[in-house]
Amino acid sequence: MEPLNELCLAALTLSIVFLTILWYKLTSHKEEPKLPPGPRGLPIVGFLPFLRTNLHHQLTELSQQYGPIYKFWLGSKLCVVLNSPSLAKEVVRDQDSVFANRDPPIAGLVGTYGGLDIGFSPYGSYWRDMRKVFVREMLSNKNLEACYSLRRHEVRKTIRNVHTKIGNPVDIGELAFVTEMNVVISIIFGSKFVEETEKRSKDGTEFRELVMKYGQVVGKPNISDFFPMLARFDLQGIKKEMEALLKLVDSILDPAISECMKMLSDRREGEIQRNEKKHLIQILLELMEQKDIGISLDLVKIKAILVDIVIGGTDTTITTVEWVMSELLNNPEIMSKVQQELKHVVGMNNIVEESHLPNLHYLDAVLKETLRLHPALPLLLPKRPSQSAIVGGYKIPEGTKVFLNVYAIHRGPQVWESPLEFQPERFLSPSTNLDYAGNNMKYLPFGSGRRICAGIPLAEKMLMFILGSLLHSFDWKLPEGEIVDLSEGFGLVLKKSERLLVIPTPRLPNFKLYQ
Ligand code: HEM
């Protein structure tokens, strides 16, 4: 071949290669997934000025306009909201390891000693170790069984207390709070500590206010989270507010932990070994001393775990008790069915024990239906993908704040029949897998995947035990002329906006059952 022809052939080949690459680039660029659609917002601040206090309501309304997946900007933060079971599956099943990361607000980080707890720590070996300690060492079946007497003691105390208020309005939230908090404190520190706390703050209001405030501050939209360069100014004072709350938390936890450490070191070896029922703090302090188990615990990490139980676990549980009681008062025929079941399973000459709980199927369905309509964390805890991902055909860049809108899924007309009606029966069919394990994407009150709630065994036991006991021991009615208020308040946890005040009357014939 002549050199000129060779040159032409080479040029032609090069041109073809170049054009092919160009064509590929152009067409493949066209196919690259886009960000989801969504409301426009304003320059710089994005959707921030349009945020309403009831975020889950607003995000559910937006899904009706923009579809099951949409985005908006809050300052420089891209947020994506997922509103359907199939999108939930993509995130918590198909790509769970990418979405198991959290996107904690600054207040959440401050309130957990820099994200050292389980709920806000990033997905990785630290979180895995802490969760293992929590689930296997602290809330194991064996441990929960071992501290039944503590739960029973506190629930019986509550029943006695209500019995002194017969005929007068009782604040259900306060009642549930005192019971749950005392249980939690006694399983962590022992019942002696509960007695001391009760002496200090007779009605528990000091604690209750702290827990409520903590939830509110973590849930408040914070400019610092959306404009990181403004974070050091703490314009709304939210960081400062949380630092003050954490000081209060410390003032409760520090002396309690010191006392336990002293008690443990004072005890003789043999006594510790003989004592099978260990308080949670003892388990944690012993793990801290064992250097060879591959988990390095220290006192701050221990406090961070306790914050998850004392603050995270309490607020969710008491709010759920309030919602169950509100729904039952609103649906007297369902209340009557629950009480019939209790009469049949427990008997009118008996009090509720935890051994009865597995047979209270209707009460269980009522609880599940309440958590469907009023999930304690309606947007779960927001996720943040550790790498760029595709969901529903759209691009979700690394670092996006992802809300899984369980509130919208639980109330979706495409997902549930008559979604706004309170119908516990839908949970009675054994063919559905509508439990708390997060396997059925249409029902996720405790989340799903690796970051599913770590406290389900305790939460379920406590909810069923408190509710069963209150509903078996008493009849409940609203004060004259009152109606049940089902409106929702503001905060991380989905609260009732109004307190629920109800009047108890004894239901059991034998006075001794209230002693
Ligand atoms: C009605 C009661 C409760 C409800 C509805 C509830 C719900 C939830 C939800 C929705 C999450 C986030 C899951 C996700 O993002 O996928 C969560 C996380 C968590 N919950 Fe609960 N919870 C309750 C009670 C409790 C209790 C009593 C405890 C402690 C004893 C607890 C400890 C935790 C912890 C440690 C996490 C973080 C898990 C992680 O990030 O790995 N919860 N909870």
Image (tube, rainbow, N blue to C red):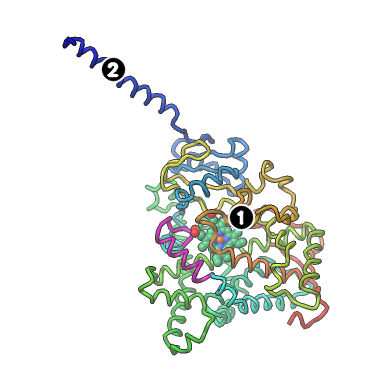
Spot occupied by residue 368 in the image (x, y as percentages of width and height): 68, 57
**In the figure, is residue 112 to the left or right of 21?**
right
Spot occupied by residue 408 in the image (x, y as percentages of width and height): 62, 46
Quadrant in the picture for the C terminus: bottom right
Q: Residues within 10 Å of mark 2 (few under 14, many from 20)?
A: few
**In the figure, is residue 357 to the left or right of 441?**
right
Q: Is 250 within the magenta?
A: no
- Of tags 2 and 1, the one toward the viewer is 2
**In the figure, is residue 154 to the left or right of 290?**
right
Up-down relation of residue 186 to residue 208 (above or below): below
Amino acid of disc 2: Ser
From the Cβ of disc 1, is ligand 1 less than 8 Å away? yes
Quadrant in the picture for the N terminus: top left
Element type at mark 1? loop
Spot occupied by residue 54 in the image (x, y as percentages of width and height): 60, 49
Q: Is 126 within the magenta?
A: yes
Decide if residue 215 is in sight here. no
Kindly check if marks 2 and 1 are in contact, taking CB atoms under 8 A apart as contact: no
Q: State the extent of the magenta-drawn residues as a range.
A: 118-139
Decide if residue 181 is in sight here. yes
- State the residue at coordinates (20%, 13%): 6
Question: What is the quadrant of residue 288 in the picture?
Answer: bottom left
The residue under label 2 is: 15
The residue under label 1 is: 445
Q: CA distance from mark 2 to mark 1?
A: 59 Å
- State the residue at coordinates (75%, 66%): 502
| SS assignment for the magenta stretch, majority | helix
